[in-house]
Image (tube, grey):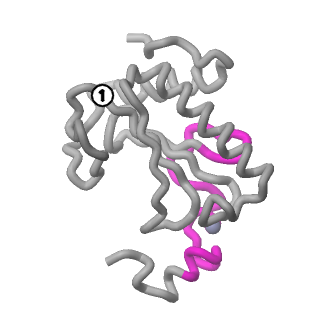
Amino acid sequence: MNSWNDQARWEALCTGEACPICSRREPLDVVAKLEASWVTMQEAAPVPGYACLVSQIHAIELHDLPEPASSAFMRDARRVSRALTAVTGAVKLNYEIHGNSLPYLHMHFFPRYRGDQFEGQPIDPRLVAQPVYGPGEFRRIRDAFLLALDSPAGGPTQAPK
Ligand SMILES: [Zn+2]
């Protein structure tokens, strides 16, 4: 059942009255704070290099963000996409904004690889076999990503081995 089928709960999530992000003041697993958003990454990811961009302003739809924050959010998204491309060797990034469980504005970044489990279709996180990272690989990709985030040119083309 989707969160939106419990109307009272859905409204409390949307208004912020019962918003888990606002009540904690930030999301879980934050690895970086950018201009208008946080970046989160976790080892239990749907695909290596998965990251999520979470607005710092409680908003549901893109048009709910004030214009300066929405421009900053897109600048942050471009910064993340450049850095992820540089460090993961992904053949393509997939960007997804759903909010069907947690309506708070967040954007998923799924690096896609030749031969990945979902080639030819979107990632389905429910079908992912864990772990997706080899030993030490999460830390290596995350650290290279954080370096690349701070590099105007996007950093090295591959994470150091
Ligand atoms: Zn909130």
Of residue 129 and residue 63, the one placed in the foreground of this image is 63
In this picture, is 4 found above or below 152? below
Image quadrant where one finds the N terminus: bottom left
In this picture, is 49 found above or below 27? above
Please state if 87 lies on the left or on the right of 76 as rendered.
Answer: left
Please state if 25 lies on the left or on the right of 123 as rendered.
Answer: right
Q: Where, by quadrant of the figure, is residue 32 drawn? A: top right
Residue at the image point whose x is 71% and y is 51% from the top: 70
Q: Residue furthest front?
A: 120
> What is the number of callouts on the image?
1
Please state if 34 lies on the left or on the right of 27 as rendered.
Answer: right
Q: Residue furthest bottom?
A: 8
Residue at the image point whose x is 63% and y is 79% from the top: 17
- Which stretch is magenta? 11-38
Residue at the image point whose x is 44% and y is 16% from the top: 159
- Report x, y in % for residue 116: 23, 32
- Image quadrant, ligand 1: bottom right
Residue at the image point whose x is 45% and y is 49% from the top: 96
Disc 1, ligand 1: is the CB inside 8 Å?
Answer: no
- Report x, y in % for residue 89: 39, 20
Q: Where, by quadrant of the figure, is residue 12 drawn? A: bottom right
In this picture, is 137 found above or below 53? above
Image quadrant where one finds the C terminus: top left
- Report x, y in % for residue 71: 73, 45
Of residue 34 and residue 62, the one placed in the foreground of this image is 62
Q: Amino acid at mark 1?
A: Tyr
Location of mark 1 (residue):
113
The verdict on residue 134 being magenta is no
Classify mark 1: residues with Cα within 10 Å, few (<14), some (14-19) or many (20+): some
Please state if 31 lies on the left or on the right of 64 as rendered.
Answer: left
Element under disc 1: loop
